[in-house]
Amino acid sequence: MKHCLLLLGMVALLAVGAPAYSQYIFMDVNGDGVCTTDDVVSNLTTSVDIYLDTNHTAAGGTVTCSDGLSALNMFGYNVIIHAGGAGSVSYTGWTNAVATWTVLEAYRTSGSDASVGFIAPSAASAPGKYKLGSFGISASGAPVMSFLTSNGSLGGGAPVTGFGSDCSGTFAAFTQVLGTDFLDACGTSSGTPSNPTTWGTIKSLYR
C-alpha cells in the first residue's frame, strides 16, 4: 500500500514552501562518489551517476524523520534532471544501481530533460547513502546538469524528484520530495576541473 502512495502522493503536491529535513541528492561525473566542482560534463562524458543520502545533509550532518519515530529509509525513487548552460546533452539511457528494484516510472526524455523511477519489490532499504543509478549521455559544449522538482517538459512519468520512505513528507504520505521536504541537491559544475583531464595539462606539471 505504501508503495502505491509513493506515486499518488507525488502527484498530489508541488511547489509549496516547507521546512527541509535536509536529505541530500547529488550527481557525480568523475567516479569519486561525491559532488564537487570537479564534476564537469564535457564531450568526453558518457554517464552521470545519481546518489541519494536519505539521512545526511550535504555537509555530513545526520538527520532524522520529523516525526521523531519513523526511519528515513527508502523503498522507491523518482529522479528528474535538466541540462542547461553553454552546451547540450542527448540522453542514451538509464542504468539502475539498486539491486532487485523494478521500474516504477519508465525512463523518458524530452529535449534537455530526463526522468525515471524505480521501486523496491518488498522490503525498504535502510537509511544511508545509495547510488541510485546512472544516466547515459552524449554531450557537446559545456552543459551544466541539475535536478528538477517537477516533470516540466516531460509531461507524464515521474512527477517530482524524491523518494518513498516510512518517513512521511510535509504534503504526501510516505514520500520525501526535493524542494518541499528537503533542499540539499548538487548538480554538475560549469567550471574547469581542478584535476588534470588532458594530456597537455598533465605534461605542464612536469615542466
Image (cartoon, rainbow, N blue to C red):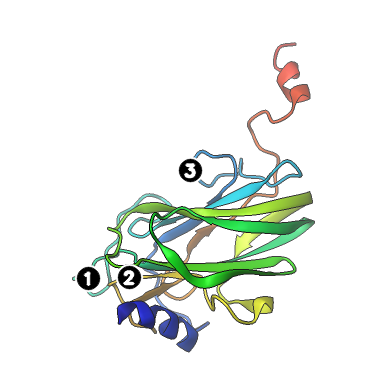
Residue receiving disc 1? 70
Residue 104 horizontal side relative to residue 29, left or right? left
**Alpha-carbon span between mark 3 and mark 1:** 27 Å
Q: Residue at x 52, y 75 (%)?
A: 160
Mark closest to the chain's N terminus, 3 or 1:
3
Residue receiving disc 3? 33
Q: Residue furthest left?
A: 69
Residue 192 horizontal side relative to residue 17, left or right? right
Would you place residue 39 above or below residue 102 in this image?
A: above
Q: Quadrant of residue 170?
A: bottom left
For numbered disc 3, what is the local secondary structure? loop
Residue receiving disc 2? 165
Which amino acid type is marked by label 3?
A: Gly
Quadrant assignment for the N terminus = bottom left
Q: Could you say which is closer to the camera, residue 53 or residue 21?
A: 53
Q: Residue at x 43, y 85 (%)?
A: 8
Which amino acid type is marked by label 2?
A: Ser
Q: Residue at x 75, y 23 (%)?
A: 199
Place of residue 161 in the rendered image (x, y in percent of width and height, measured from the top left): 51, 70
Q: Could you say which is closer to the camera, residue 135 or residue 64?
A: 135
